Image (cartoon, helix red, strand yellow):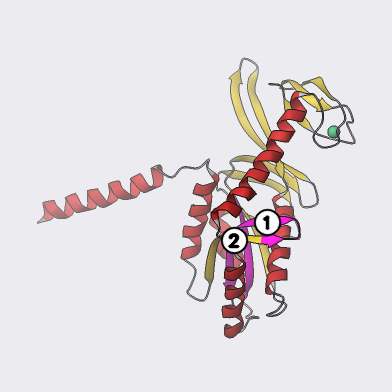
């Protein structure tokens, strides 16, 4: 009897261990799933909509999570990044910094730029505002969530940018009801009926992003800055040679040399 209980405990322990260890952390989708699981723990009055694609004036926009609740509509953008994250709420781009390879003089670092996620989420917020405007004007709260492995070195006094582990408390800090029950249903209906589920439309969205990336790669290969179309020049940096825009300091575009 005691033996079998022991075996069951070991089995459960192994299962939990496996679940923790097997969680991938570099793929965006895995991050979205992880956040979705975190959101599932919210009380029933919070309705969670995952992976919503809405039409905008310029095409479409893909939203990781929307949480509709009596306390407001939360729009959540997930970034499954690790390392140091640097950024300001008004800047165009943010930067991820990772420790790179060990060199004889120390560690090299690796930098990646990405679009300011607050701005990305503002576009999502506008799309939701437009789609739900017939029902009413509601409180929409944009939230950007980073992996717990990200060390946030950011200044965003007017926006919520948190790690996964703080997501629930970021949502729960809004505790004044402002959306009546029947409107919640209407809002969800509006979003669901605007949601583009057609595979072709979704592929078109993905390939337009892909095209932009390809075009940028092409420009960089031809030593043209994709941001301002000035010439790119090779420069010496602390971590080796890189391509920089000749229009610096006006344009701060940089790229590794392939
Ligand atoms: Zn430039």
Residue ranking furthest to the left? 1
For label 1, the SS is strand
Residue drawn where x is 83% and y is 34% of the image: 252
Residue drawn where x is 82% and y is 31% of the image: 225
Location of mark 2 (residue): 196
**Camera sees residue 143:** yes
Image coordinates for residue 179, horizontal then vertical, percent: 63, 81
- Tell me the crowding category of disc 1: few under 14, some 14 to 19, or many 20 or more residues within 10 angstroms, Cα based: some
Image coordinates for residue 108, horizontal then vertical, percent: 65, 24
**Quadrant containing the N terminus in the rendered view:** bottom left
Q: Quadrant of ligand 1?
A: top right
Query: Distance of mark 2 from mark 1, alpha carbons?
Result: 9 Å
Residue drawn where x is 46% and y is 42% of the image: 24
Is 186 or 98 nearer to us in this picture?
A: 186
Q: As displayed, is residue 16 above or below residue 67?
A: above
Location of mark 1 (residue): 60
Q: As displayed, is residue 246 above or below residue 169?
A: above
Horizontally, residue 72 falls left or right of residue 237, namely: left
In the figure, residue 157 lies in which quadrant?
A: bottom right
Q: As displayed, is residue 6 above or below residue 225?
A: below
Main SS class of the magenta portion in the image: strand
Q: Earlier in the sequence, mark 2 or mark 1?
A: 1
User: Is mark 2 in CB contact (under 8 Å) with mark 1?
Assistant: yes
* Part of the protein shown in magenta: 55-78
Q: Is residue 155 magenta?
A: no
Is 158 or 75 nearer to us in this picture?
A: 75
């Amino acid at each position: 009897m005691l033996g079998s209980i022991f075996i069951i405990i070991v089995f459960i322990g192994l299962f939990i261990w496996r679940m923790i260890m097997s969680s991938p952390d570099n793929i965006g989708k895995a991050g979205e799933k992880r956040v979705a699981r975190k959101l599932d723990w919210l009380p029933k009055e919070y309705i969670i909509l995952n992976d919503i694609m809405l039409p905008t004036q310029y095409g479409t926009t893909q939203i990781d999570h929307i949480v509709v609740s009596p306390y407001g509509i939360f729009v959540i953008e997930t970034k499954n990044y690790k390392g140091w994250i640097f950024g300001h709420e008004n800047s165009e781009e943010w930067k991820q910094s990772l420790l790179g390879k060990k060199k004889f003089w120390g560690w090299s670092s690796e930098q990646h730029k990405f679009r300011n996620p607050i701005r990305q989420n503002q576009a999502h917020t506008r799309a939701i505002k437009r789609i739900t405007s017939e029902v009413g004007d509601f409180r929409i709260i944009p939230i950007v969530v980073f992996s717990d492995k990200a060390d946030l070195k950011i200044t965003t006094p007017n926006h919520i940018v948190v790690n996964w582990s703080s997501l629930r408390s970021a949502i729960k800090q809004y505790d004044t009801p402002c959306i009546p029950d029947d409107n919640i249903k209407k809002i969800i209906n509006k979003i669901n009926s605007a949601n583009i589920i057609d595979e072709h439309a979704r592929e078109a969205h993905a390939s337009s992003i892909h095209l932009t990336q390809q075009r940028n790669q092409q420009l960089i290969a031809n030593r043209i800055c994709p941001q301002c179309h000035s010439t790119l020049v090779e420069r010496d940096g602390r971590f080796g040679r890189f391509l920089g825009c000749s229009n610096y300091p006006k344009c701060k575009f940089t790229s590794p040399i392939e």
